[in-house]
Image: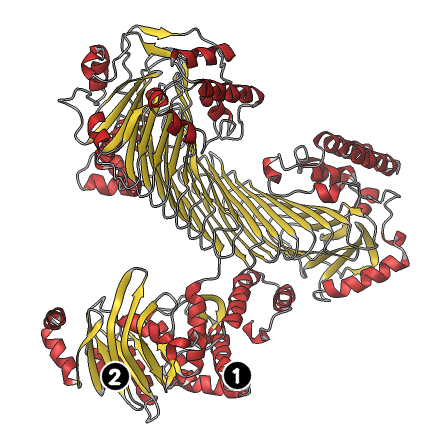
């Protein structure tokens, strides 16, 4: 089964590679395909995939859309109509820069890039690859280890489009950049967007990635590579609203240098299986890394959050808060690891994972791990899984609030805690409305 | 208004109340005093309906109705208010929202329309001023990062907003300095009316200088061992609880 | 700073005081493992046919299994054919009379602080002394018999109470459970069997003292404790081995069964030879321990102080099957020099209102690597199940490691699992403060370390707590100065 499927990808890849690409890119894609062929799709025998079974969705191969990469204009008018429809739901703020990708390819018509400061680049990978490939070669080639990740290898095999955000030294990006990834049609479409974000020394930016789709059998396999130079700052938001039925795998690799600050805000609502991988390398002193996440699976959804924070150098702080609310037959996985290397003295790492189970058919698996090789460190992790706090419920009821409403309020408050960590008002408002949707809570709770 | 008859209650395997009798009429203020572990807090929580306790014998009538048969929120809606000794912190829920939701829940129970925003804010402002509280606190999460004194004031604020018929103050004086104590007492006294009653549960006589009780009861070993007027409180202050505990053992 | 470093350096060194060898002639079989060896062990013990079959089944299954690699410990592959699977002191002890036990053996145990003579026996502790592959003596047997308590070397229990053994053996840990459990099931030599009948509160502590003496010998003992309805027993396990340059394998299996209202308290002070400061020699301690709270309101409590062994790999677990049953795990694990430990527990909540508590204290010094690995599962029926876990690590020196790998799975909305972990080091300011009050640096470190472990010591039986404290201080001795 798997063999034939890999063969299908090999065939698609052969078609894909015929375009005119620089040699290094052809070679890179080939290495991606070779690694993917060697690794095969992950099975539950792998410790990292112990709780997440992707085999049911990946039994038949997806269509990587290999007929050239000239992007936007190839989208059919139906696809564009569908995409505009989705875009309305995804839309956050008209003032933001917006790059829209349909099935992994940039669509100029739906996008909107405002004027930017000199030196700032907001562009597409496809464009960069055809016009100035040298500028992206290094980042594409060096910073992602796909040798033990089949999905990263698959993305590399088909790498071709995505967003490029370059903020030069000392520049603060005036408006947030909103990347919107839309899947249209009802086929088994596979999109492999690759985003490259580079913030120069002392630069600052806000990036939001939204994922949405119409069909119920597509596969998004996205990778974002972030490089933060000394004292750079980035707030990175991911709003995962894929259609139920879809498979969503996304990987974010972050390479941080001294005194930089990275904040990740991850919100997972959609897809049948959603796996988010977040790898942060703290490669400099005085770095601050914050990872916040909220996952709310219902129905048969499975959401798997895997995070790695690698403290390689001394005097860095990391804070991690992941919360899950699980209903119906949903499954949730939190798999968070903190490494503290020998040199990483004076590390302060805090990790907290909390989950609420609203149904006896729901399952949550939590694996918070610490691997510590330095002695002068402060590392803590905590995991709590269970019901709402009884004391809080009692207190609300003692003030006359009926038990049902009290429960809804507390669930909302539990989730809202993560939402309030988002600083962009439009993003926060969007998330608040998602949380309130389907509840009897008045908006005053905000 | 409130009639407690031969109340026995336990938590897990410990029998805490062993036959409490108490009658509270409208307009009255009762003080319940007693040493630590005598069951004062248990009695307060049983009136509010906390589910950790099991009533094994006896009954509580509230305005003629069986109080023990009501849910926690039903009791609150019927006008029973407990000022908690340890107010609970609720992250992510603002005080303002909490108060308004509580008020509207009670209104809904009585088939009344929700309070208008403007009316609510005006009422809130008035009460905040009376209690010397900063309105910024209303946008903070319920009791989260409040000092001990702020939490107690917040309880009194809720009481002032909800206008209960029967207020039970569980050790509201603990951890308060003298200024805060006066403010809290003023809040309680302001609510005093012929239709309402208050039960003040306290370890010390100090609070009773400001909230003058009509009746004082001593709870020891799970029973009311002595009742009297406010002079009993002074007697206790002088002699301590020791002599009463001996009496309790003797009976 | 330099003085502190020097202190921490030395802290990592330590002396092992039970490293002597007893010169005694042994009846040992040739090294190597095969079906014939399994048959030979079984025949040496004059075992019934069913037990031989049971061993063979385990052996055949073991052949199909692979040595686990998921743990966080590193060691060269073990050559199971190089090991000796049976070794017994030649002079066959008469188990009913201690007077006939070889005096050299009695002397050995006396040296280890476990006198076996009737006059000198430990007050109120019944001891089963296991030397290499066989049990050489069991004290207080008659006293226990009066109460209906059966406390016997395993091989004798097989002869005297075959039905009981047959009923419970492998009922908690099946022969196919894991690689080392399967190996143990095939070749286990001796161990202890305890049976506490209905309603009996065992009048004294029961204890087994394991000693590895012979060279190149693996020790594979098997312990089975059954507490019937309403019974109570507190069981202690101790172990030591001589200093030898080669690694020796110790793969034990311990099974506990608690029926309704029964309680089993199992305490271990593990002090196998840890190897020298270069990491040469030492015991590979690969142990499977599991208890089944089969009955309602039953309770199983594991307490372990792990100071020895080159590698410790063990996860004493509890299956909380009966409603309202309680599982506990209290652990102190020390890794100094080149020691490695991957230890923790599993709490599997199946019944209603089941409760479990996990307190794990890991101490790493030198280049020691200490991992806590635990699993808490709340199954669908575990209504109101509760677990609280706390895993703290203390690091001494900057070349050691402390790791935490908890797995939590919850399938019931009313269940609640709380896990906390922290890592810290012995603080300079703490040492400074204590020294200012007159303590030596070494005493200061001991005091801090003992304070760190207090929650675990508090649940150990008193004599054991003292021994544990002493052992830990010895472990750290010379490592400070």
Look at 33% across and 11% down and name the residue there: C88
Residue located 13% across and 22% down the image: C119
- Please, what secondary structure does the residue beneath circle 2 have? strand
Q: Chain of mark 1?
A: B
Out of A27 and A57, give the one closest to the viewer.
Answer: A57
Q: Is residue C366 visible?
A: no
Q: Residue A319: x percent and y percent?
A: 50, 51
Q: Horizontal placement of A404 versus C322: left or right?
A: right
Examine the rendered structure and indicate whether residue A288 appears above or below residue C448.
below
User: Where residue B188 appears, x then y in whole percent?
Assistant: 32, 84
Circle count: 2
Q: Relative to residue C179, is residue A167 depicted above or below?
A: below
Q: Residue C453 in the image: x percent, y percent?
A: 30, 39
Is the image coloured rainbow, by chain, by secondary structure, or in one colour?
secondary structure
Q: Give residue C421's quadrant in the image.
A: top left
Q: Chain of mark 2?
A: B
Camera-side residue of B84 and A317: B84
Check disc 2 and report the residue beneath it.
B30
Give the quadrant of residue C477: top left
Q: Is residue A31 left or right of residue C151?
A: right
Q: Quadrant of residue A46?
A: top right
SS under mark 1: helix
To which residue does mark 1 refer?
Answer: B108
Q: Residue at x 53, y 30 (%)?
A: C70
């Amino acid at each position: 089964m798997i063999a034939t499927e890999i063969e299908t990808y090999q065939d698609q890849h052969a078609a894909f590679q015929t375009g005119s690409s620089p040699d290094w890119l052809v070679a890179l894609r080939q290495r991606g395909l070779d690694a993917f062929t060697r690794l095969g799709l992950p099975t539950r025998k792998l410790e990292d995939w112990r709780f997440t079974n992707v085999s049911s969705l990946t039994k038949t191969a997806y269509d990587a859309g290999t007929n050239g990469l000239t992007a936007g204009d190839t989208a059919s008018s139906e696809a564009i109509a569908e995409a505009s429809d989705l875009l309305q739901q995804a839309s956050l703020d008209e003032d933001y820069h917006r790059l829209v990708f349909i099935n992994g390819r940039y669509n100029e018509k739906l996008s909107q890039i405002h004027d930017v400061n000199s030196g700032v680049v907001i562009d597409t990978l496809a464009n960069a690859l055809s016009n100035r490939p040298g500028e992206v070669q290094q980042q594409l080639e060096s910073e992602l280890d796909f040798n033990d990740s089949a999905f990263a290898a698959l993305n590399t095999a088909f790498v071709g489009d995505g967003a490029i955000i370059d903020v030069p030294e000392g520049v603060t990006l005036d408006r947030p950049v909103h990347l919107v990834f839309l899947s249209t049609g009802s086929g088994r479409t596979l999109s492999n967007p690759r985003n490259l974000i580079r913030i120069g020394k002392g630069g600052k930016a806000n990036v939001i990635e939204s994922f949405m789709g119409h069909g119920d059998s597509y596969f998004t396999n996205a990778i974002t590579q972030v490089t933060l130079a000394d004292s750079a700052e980035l707030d990175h938001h991911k709003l995962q609203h894929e259609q139920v039925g879809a498979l969503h795998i996304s990987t974010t690799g972050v390479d941080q240098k001294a005194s930089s600050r990275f904040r990740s805000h991850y919100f997972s609502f959609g897809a049948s299986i959603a796996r988010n991988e977040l790898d942060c390398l703290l490669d400099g002193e005085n770095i601050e890394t914050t990872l916040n996440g909220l996952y709310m699976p219902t129905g048969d959804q499975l959401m798997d959050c895997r995070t790695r924070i690698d403290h390689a150098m001394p005097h860095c702080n990391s804070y991690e808060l992941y919360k899950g609310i699980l209903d119906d037959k949903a499954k949730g996985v939190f798999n968070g690891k903190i490494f503290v290397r020998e040199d990483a003295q004076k590390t302060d790492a805090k990790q907290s994972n909390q989950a609420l189970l609203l149904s006896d058919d729901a399952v949550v698996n939590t694996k918070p791990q610490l691997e510590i090789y330095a002695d002068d460190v402060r590392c803590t992790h905590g995991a709590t899984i269970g019901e709402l706090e009884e004391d809080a419920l009692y207190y609300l009821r003692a003030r006359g609030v009926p038990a049902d409403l009290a429960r809804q309020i507390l669930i909302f408050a539990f989730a809202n805690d993560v939402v309030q960590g988002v600083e962009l008002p439009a993003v926060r408002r969007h998330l608040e409305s998602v949380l309130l949707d389907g509840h009897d809570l008045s908006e005053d709770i905000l | 208004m409130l009639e407690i008859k031969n109340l026995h209650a336990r938590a897990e395997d410990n029998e805490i109340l062993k036959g409490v009798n108490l009658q509270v009429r409208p307009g009255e203020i009762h003080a319940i005093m007693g040493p630590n572990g005598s069951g004062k807090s248990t009695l307060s929580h049983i009136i509010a309906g906390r589910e950790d306790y099991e009533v094994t014998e006896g009954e509580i009538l509230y305005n003629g109705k069986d109080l023990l048969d009501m849910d926690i929120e039903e009791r609150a809606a019927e006008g029973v208010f407990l000022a908690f000794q340890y107010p609970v912190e609720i992250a992510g829920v603002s005080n303002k929202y909490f108060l308004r939701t509580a008020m509207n829940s009670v209104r809904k129970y009585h088939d009344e329309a929700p309070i208008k925003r403007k009316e609510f804010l005006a009422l809130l402002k008035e009460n905040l001023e009376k209690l010397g509280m900063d309105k910024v606190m209303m946008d903070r999460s319920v009791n989260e990062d409040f000092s001990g004194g702020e939490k107690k004031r917040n309880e009194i604020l809720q009481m002032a907003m909800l206008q209960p018929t029967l207020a039970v103050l569980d050790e509201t004086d603990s951890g308060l300095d003298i200024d805060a104590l006066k403010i809290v007492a003023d809040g309680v006294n302001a609510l005093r009316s012929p239709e309402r009653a208050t039960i003040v549960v306290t370890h010390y006589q100090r609070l009773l200088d400001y909230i003058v009780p009509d009746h004082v009861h001593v709870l020891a070993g799970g029973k009311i061992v002595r009742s009297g007027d406010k002079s009993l409180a002074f007697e206790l202050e002088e002699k301590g609880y020791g002599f009463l505990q001996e009496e309790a053992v003797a009976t | 700073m330099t003085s502190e470093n020097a202190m921490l350096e030395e802290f990592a060194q330590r002396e092992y005081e039970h490293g002597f060898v007893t010169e005694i002639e042994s009846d040992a079989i040739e090294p190597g493992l095969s079906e014939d060896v399994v048959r030979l062990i079984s025949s040496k013990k004059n075992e019934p046919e069913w037990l031989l079959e049971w061993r063979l089944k385990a052996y055949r299954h073991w052949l199909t299994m692979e040595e686990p690699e998921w743990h966080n410990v590193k060691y060269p592959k073990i050559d199971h054919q190089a090991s000796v699977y049976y070794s017994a002191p030649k002079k066959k002890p008469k188990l009913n009379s201690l007077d006939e036990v070889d005096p050299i053996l009695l002397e050995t145990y006396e040296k280890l602080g476990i006198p076996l003579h009737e006059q000198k026996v430990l007050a109120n502790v019944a001891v089963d002394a296991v030397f290499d592959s066989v049990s050489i003596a069991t004290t207080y047997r008659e006293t226990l018999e009066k109460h209906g308590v059966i406390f016997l070397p395993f091989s004798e229990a097989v002869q005297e109470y075959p039905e009981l053994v047959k009923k419970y053996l492998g009922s908690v840990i099946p022969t196919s459970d894991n690689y080392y459990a399967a190996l143990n099931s095939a070749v286990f030599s001796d161990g202890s069997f305890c049976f506490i009948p209905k309603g009996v509160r065992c009048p004294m502590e029961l204890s087994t003292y394991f000693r590895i003496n012979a060279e190149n010998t693996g020790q594979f003992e098997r312990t089975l404790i059954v507490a019937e309805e309403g019974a109570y027993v507190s069981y202690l396990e101790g172990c030591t081995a001589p200093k030898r340059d080669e690694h020796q394998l110790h793969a034990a299996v311990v099974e506990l069964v608690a029926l309704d209202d029964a309680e089993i308290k199992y305490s271990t002070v593990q002090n196998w030879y840890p190897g020298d400061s270069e990491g040469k020699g030492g015991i590979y301690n690969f142990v499977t321990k599991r208890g089944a709270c089969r009955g309602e309101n039953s309770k199983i409590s594991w307490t372990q102080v792990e100071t020895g062994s080159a590698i410790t790999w063990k996860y004493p677990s509890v299956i909380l099957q009966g409603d309202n049953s309680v599982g506990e795990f209290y652990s102190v694990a020390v890794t100094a020099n080149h020691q490695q430990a991957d230890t923790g527990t599993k709490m599997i909540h199946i019944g209603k209102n089941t409760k479990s508590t996990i307190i794990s204290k890991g101490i790493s010094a030198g280049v020691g690597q200490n991992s806590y690995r635990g699993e808490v599962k709340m199954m669908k029926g575990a209504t109101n199940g509760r677990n609280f876990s706390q895993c703290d690590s203390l690091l001494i020196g900057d070349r050691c490691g402390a790791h935490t790998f908890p797995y939590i799975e919850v399938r019931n909305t009313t269940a609640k699992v709380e896990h906390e972990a922290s890592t810290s080091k012995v603080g300079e300011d703490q040492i400074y403060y204590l020294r200012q009050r007159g303590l030596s640096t070494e005493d200061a470190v001991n005091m801090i370390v003992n304070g760190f472990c207090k929650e675990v010591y508090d649940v150990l039986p008193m004599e054991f707590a003292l021994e544990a404290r002493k052992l830990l201080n010895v472990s750290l001795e010379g490592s400070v100065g």
